[in-house]
Image (cartoon, rainbow, N blue to C red):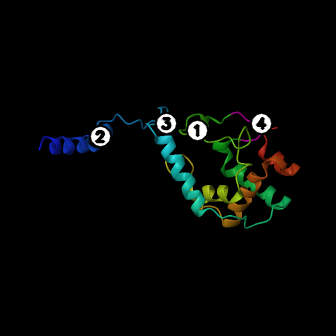
Amino acid sequence: MKFIVGLIIGLLIIPIGTYLYFRLGYAPVATAESPMPFETQIARMALKARIEKESPKNAAIPVSPENMISGAKIYHDNCAFCHGLKGQEKTPAAEGMFPKPPQLFTGHGVTDDPPGETYWKTANGIRLTGMPAYKQSLSDQQMWEVSVMLANADKLPDESVRIVSTK
């Protein structure tokens, strides 16, 4: 009987403790605080699985100078505020965000990501980050243009480079 009571109490401690952790305000919710235990790993795992499951495998538009120039303009107008421009330090908005948005033209950007993955992120956004979903505000063509431009950011036409650069 003591074993069963101990087992029941043991099973109740975790959900009650978790509830109290959140209810009493111990969970970090400010962007300046460190993440909760396992928060980063769980979020990355879920995002990766969802993108693998749902992202288009092939770009719906060709890689062309016209599409990359158009994509650069869309990026400049909609994405640079958080993700920055080529040759720019982190933007003030990016400094205050958690998690920090990747600076797409510095270090590891998205040039290694398939355009379908970037398209999925652009269309759907990413929960618990500042990344909004653009499928209500940009057309499919526009989301593909910015995705193709970013996937080929290391080989942009000169006009595209001028649009997404600080220089």
Residue occupying image coordinates x 82% and y 38%? 167
Magenta stretch: give its range. 85-89
Q: Kindly state the secondary structure of the residue where label 4 is placed.
A: loop
Residue at which label 4 appears: 87
Q: Kindly state the secondary structure of the residue where label 2 is placed.
A: helix
Residue at which label 3 appears: 31
Which label belongs to residue 100? 1
Residue at which label 2 appears: 23
Mark closer to the chain start, 3 or 2: 2
Overall secondary structure of the magenta stretch? loop
- Is residue 157 located in the magenta-colored stretch of the structure? no
Amino acid type, residue under disc 2 in the picture: Arg
Q: Can residue 126 be spotted in the picture?
A: no
Label 2 to label 4: alpha-carbon separation: 44 Å
Disc 4 crowd, CA 10 A, few/some/many (<14, 14-19, 20+)? few
- Is residue 86 located in the magenta-colored stretch of the structure? yes
Mark closer to the chain start, 1 or 2: 2
Q: Can residue 56 be spotted in the picture?
A: yes
Asked where in the image residue 121 lies, by quadrant, the reply is bottom right
- Among all residues in the image, which is located at the extreme right? 158
Q: How many callouts does the rendering have?
A: 4
Residue occupying image coordinates x 73% and y 64%? 59
Amino acid type, residue under disc 3 in the picture: Thr
The answer to whether 45 appears left or right of 28 in the picture is right
Q: Are marks 2 and 4 in contact (CB under 8 Å)?
A: no
